[in-house]
Amino acid sequence: MEQLQDPVLAGSYYFWCAHTYSYLGNREQAAQSAQRALEEGRHCGDDATMGKAHYVLARQGFWWSHYPQAVDHGLQAVALLERSQEWWWLGQAYWAVGINYYFMGDFDLALEAEGRAHALGEARGDPRLQTYTDWCSGWILATRGDWEAAIAVCQRSLERSRDAFNTLAATGWLGFAYRAKGDLARAIPLLDQAIQQLVQVGYQTLEGGFRAWLGEALYLNCEYEKACIMATQALQMGRELRSPYTVAYAQRVLGQIAQANGVMSESHAHLSAALDTFTAIQARFEAGRTHLALAELDHAQGNRDTATAHVNNAHALFMALKTPRYVERTQQLARAYGLVVSSVETLHPDHRNSETLH
């Protein structure tokens, strides 16, 4: 390739290197190859190659929790791929944009992006794009509290699945949706089944997150010993893979388990670390959920002022993110604890214009 000195071939070559490295979890090689593909694409005005390279960087972003940068790459990919009429890769780019918006808590924008990807799949008769966007849309819906709709689209993804990866993904996210609804009897076996399938194919990037979710489901089912094992495994995998989101999610579960076992200092350490990480990576919804967990811990310890602060921070985030079920949940918690919820504007004026940022 170096001897040929042909930027058209080189751009395509480096894109495929980046694409493959990203699935192998080789972070640096994927980023370097994607940047090289962009350089070669610019040399010859190859919009398609540049668009696909930006798509890889957008996908890299949600694996490694660089969500705002990943959205920027994804939107650049969309613009370039629309211009070059690379419809299949355009669908993938919308899919990646949607996932990054999801992690940031911008659920409406996430669903809009996934809807555009799904529409491309329908227009082109591509079942793979349709099934991938179904489980992703189910993930978004389940997280913000639309549980029945989430279960329906995840089930549809599973029933229409054409490949092994989509089958295990749809299985796992169906379990996630049942866990979000509170149906632990259905959630736990589905999540466990998805993890076993991931172990067989050796896809650790996704496995850590699924283990964290299963740990949470087991904790909610009062199976604390099993939950601790699963969450500890998730924490280790998250650290090895350098996935801050997985690390923080696992830490929150471990903090809740520690509180249930009466080890309050350990609980506070885990929950505080989780909050710091979620805040740093701009995962606002999960930061809100972690504020609620800390509020429960502080209330249990009689720390009224800090419990009030955490409840109000959670309420402000959920109001800004337009998640009414969690706004209501926060208000119910405040009433139960005798805490006062202040106005969103007073606590977090910077959240009022958050919807205009992206």
Image: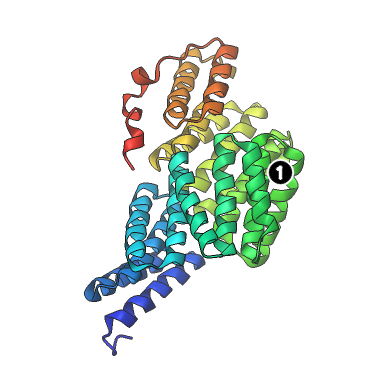
Front-lying residue, 103 or 302: 103
Q: Is residue 207 above or below residue 201?
A: above
Residue appearing at x 66%, y 48% in the figure: 174
Name the secondary structure under disc 1: helix
Q: Is residue 109 left or right of residue 228?
A: left
Q: Is residue 70 above or below residue 30?
A: above
Q: Quadrant of the C terminus?
A: top left
The reply to whether residue 243 is visible in this rendering is no
Front-lying residue, 36 or 88: 88
Q: Is residue 160 left or right of residue 111?
A: right
Q: Quadrant of the N terminus?
A: bottom left
Image spot of residue 236 (x, y percent) = 56, 51
Mark 1 Cα-neighbour bin, 10 Å: few <14, some 14–19, many ≥20 = many
Residue appearing at x 55%, y 22% in the figure: 328
Q: Quadrant of residue 251?
A: top right
Q: Is residue 254 left or right of residue 105?
A: right
Residue appearing at x 63%, y 48% in the figure: 153
Image spot of residue 339 (x, y percent) = 51, 12
Q: Is residue 148 above or below residue 56?
A: above
Image spot of residue 224 (x, y percent) = 71, 37
Q: Which residue type carries mark 1? A: Ala
Name the residue at the bottom extreme.
Answer: 3
Q: Is residue 78 above or below residue 101?
A: below
For the image shown, how many numbered marks are present on the structure?
Answer: 1
Residue appearing at x 65%, y 26% in the figure: 262
Q: Which residue is mark 1?
A: 187
